[in-house]
Amino acid sequence: MSYRNKTYVAFASENIKSYRLMEAWRENKHIDFNFYDAHDLNVSRDTSQPETIKRNLRERMKNAKQVVLLGSSDAKRKGSDGASFLAHEVKVLMEFNLPVVVANLDGDRTIDRNFIPTPLLNADYYTVSVSFQPAIIRFALDGYVPAFAAGNKSGPHYYKEEIYTKLGL
């Protein structure tokens, strides 16, 4: 199961509550969702210098096998600005050629280009967009990540409604 590999969750600081919700899903014995969080490695304090934080982010991502990007307009803005920590994360994930699942925080099940950072779109980087729900995120990490490794697709993708129906969503 791919989703049990080290997973890096990238998000705009405005979306920290959604990241915390993902951690709660992982801890809830009634929800079949688990991931090995790369954020547990190389923790930076809020008082760390930006260079130290960026170095630690790179080290965390070096240990990751896949990325879940919490998709939002804030993620688009910050991931595209070239200066924020999220922009640094986007640059590094592309450098490391990590598979990216975009979890749309508004529940959208299709590609929302207003939620995907511009560098990913400009590079025609192979991503898959899903709604922010544990079952479909897990499905994407299990199915998309191996497809990403095959290297025969590019650009943003999404799952058709039949997949959501099959998952009971």
Image (spheres, helix red, strand yellow):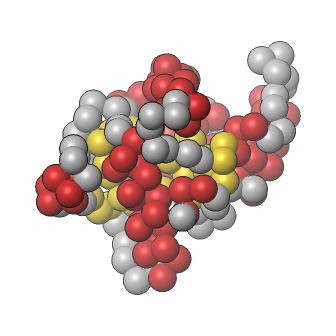
Q: Is residue 125 above or below residue 17?
A: below
Identify which residue, 40 or 123, lies in the foreground: 40
Quadrant of image for the C terminus = top left
Look at 75% across and 57% down and name the residue there. 62
**Residue 42: which quarter of the image?**
top right
Look at 55% across and 45% down and name the residue there. 34
Left-right relation of 47 to 138 = right
Identify which residue, 119 or 133, lies in the foreground: 133
Left-right relation of 102 to 20 = left
Q: Is residue 91 visible?
A: no
**Image spot of residue 19 (x, y percent):** 52, 29
Look at 32% across and 61% down and name the residue there. 156
**Image spot of residue 152 (x, y percent):** 40, 83
Left-right relation of 101 to 167 = right
Look at 75% across and 47% down and name the residue there. 60
**Residue 128: which quarter of the image?**
bottom left
Quadrant of image for the N terminus = bottom right
**Image spot of residue 71 (x, y percent):** 39, 38
